[in-house]
């Protein structure tokens, strides 16, 4: 395939991509090189929380690009400090480290927990994680993940990540020993198929980790920044974790991530942690615009309302097609189907005419919805109507 006479085979193969090139985006819509438009319910993988090319983000990017792009991570800059202050003012954490990807933020969380264990827990280093969890694609975060097959893909793994079962507190308790330093989980397993940890389980985890003096780490790379209908998903269960990581939505589409910790946990010393681009003003200025828009009066209420609207539509489809319901929070939801045609559905929805719809099958038997948080009910109707058309075509 060629695009504007440039063959694209020079890109290293990592996955099969459709023969289209996206050239433009606006809100919930993406446009390809043939001028066809697509209603986007993937949004860069739950990344573009404010849709494509959000005006506030563009302005922040433009203004900052003219002022200062990168003074180096060894110096303070204004957007970095403002964004850190906004995050601590709106969470239970007092300290922030900025990174460039979710995996990198999680690596930081793992290092911080191990450092804390060395300092306060006799060198304890094991972090209990969960089956079907996803924490990133570096070697350590792959080792922390409970994705089937990842234990052998780039073996040997980084040791120290025993796996428990989500929503089964006894399975966590059984793994605790004197080497254990933390428990780490996604409040809603995203890549695993939108599987929420129950509020009761989160409370049990908090109690158990307090009892054994362990850190509770929430990976909110996918669930954070409004996605689950509250600014952070841990807030839904009324508990306060010790460490949180953010990615995806915090940058609204640009590479930005963060590691947050309570004051007494933030034990890095000079030279322990860093990164060339961390806290650079260009990306943190965009993150500042994103978070300011998310906490504007009424915005998160709107996310919850649209989440309920999507949920009602999915339940209706489930009932009409004899499926198994839906699950999720806010605008991270999944339709639980009664067959394994997820990948076929994704392909047919994209190929619909005149407008395609971009969907994701996190597993073959479910469709995951992660639209822009400012998607409209009319756009939700369009996406669900298209899904019905595709389901009918498969019947
Ligand atoms: C996407 C994701 C990551 C990895 O983020 P990257 O920016 O791709 O490194 C980590 N944890 C969760 C829960 C995610 O959804």
Image (tube, helix red, strand yellow):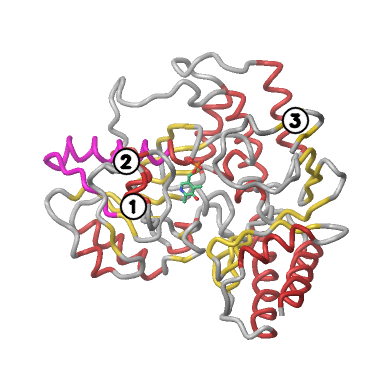
From the viewer's perspective, is residue 172 above or below residue 4?
Answer: below
Q: Residue at x 76, y 41 (%)?
A: 22
Quadrant in the picture for the C terminus: bottom right
Mark 3 or 1, closer to the camera: 1
Looking at the rendering, the stretch of residues picked out in magenta corresponds to 105-128
Q: Residue at x 81, y 64 (%)?
A: 378
Q: Is residue 123 part of the magenta span, yes or no?
A: yes
Q: Label 1, on which residue?
A: 184
Work out whether 9 lies above or below 91: above
Residue 268, given in percent of the width and then of the height, sits at 30, 29
Categorize mark 3 by other alpha carbons within 10 Å: few (<14), some (14-19), many (20+): some
Residue 110 inside the magenta-drawn segment: yes
Residue wearing tag 2 = 110
Q: Which mark is residue 59?
A: 3
Name the dominant secondary structure of the magenta segment: helix
Residue at 62% from the left image edge and 35% from the top image edge = 254
- Element type where label 1 sits in the image: strand
């Amino acid at each position: 395939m060629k695009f504007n006479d440039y063959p694209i085979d020079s890109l290293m193969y990592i996955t099969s991509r459709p023969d289209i090139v996206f050239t433009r985006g606006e809100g919930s819509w993406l446009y390809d090189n043939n001028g066809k438009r697509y209603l986007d319910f993937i949004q860069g993988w739950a990344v573009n929380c404010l849709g494509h090319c959000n005006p506030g983000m563009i302005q922040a990017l433009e203004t900052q690009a003219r002022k200062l792009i990168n003074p180096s991570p060894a110096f303070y800059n204004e957007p970095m400090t403002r964004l850190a202050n906004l995050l601590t003012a709106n969470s239970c954490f007092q300290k922030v480290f900025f990174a460039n990807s979710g995996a990198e933020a999680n690596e930081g969380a793992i290092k911080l927990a191990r450092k804390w264990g060395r300092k306060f827990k006799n060198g304890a280093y094991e972090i209990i994680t969960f089956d079907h969890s996803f924490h990133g694609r570096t070697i350590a975060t792959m080792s922390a993940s409970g994705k089937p097959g990842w234990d052998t893909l780039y073996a040997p793994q980084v040791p120290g990540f025993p796996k428990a079962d989500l929503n089964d507190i006894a399975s966590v308790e059984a793994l605790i020993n004197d080497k254990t330093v933390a428990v780490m989980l996604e409040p809603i397993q995203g890549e695993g198929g939108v599987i929420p940890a129950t509020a009761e389980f989160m409370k049990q985890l908090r109690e158990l980790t307090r009892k054994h003096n362990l850190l509770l780490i929430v990976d909110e790379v996918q669930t954070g920044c409004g996605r689950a209908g509250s600014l952070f998903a841990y807030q839904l269960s009324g508990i306060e974790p010790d460490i949180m990581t953010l990615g995806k939505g915090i940058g609204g589409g640009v590479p930005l991530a963060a590691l947050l910790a309570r004051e007494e946990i933030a034990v890095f010393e000079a030279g322990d942690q860093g990164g060339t681009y961390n806290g650079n003003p260009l990306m943190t200025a965009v993150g500042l615009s994103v978070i300011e828009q998310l906490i504007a009066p009424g915005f998160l209420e709107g996310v919850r309302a649209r989440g309920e609207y999507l949920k009602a539509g999915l339940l209706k489809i489930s009932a009409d097609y004899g499926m198994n319901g839906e699950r999720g929070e806010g605008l991270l939801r999944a339709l639980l189907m009664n067959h394994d045609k997820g990948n076929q559905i994704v392909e047919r929805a994209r190929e619909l005419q005149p407008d395609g719809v971009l969907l994701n099958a996190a597993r073959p038997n479910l469709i995951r919805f992660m639209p822009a948080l400012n998607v409209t009910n009319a756009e939700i109707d369009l996406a669900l109507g298209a899904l019905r058309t595709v389901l009918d075509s498969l019947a």
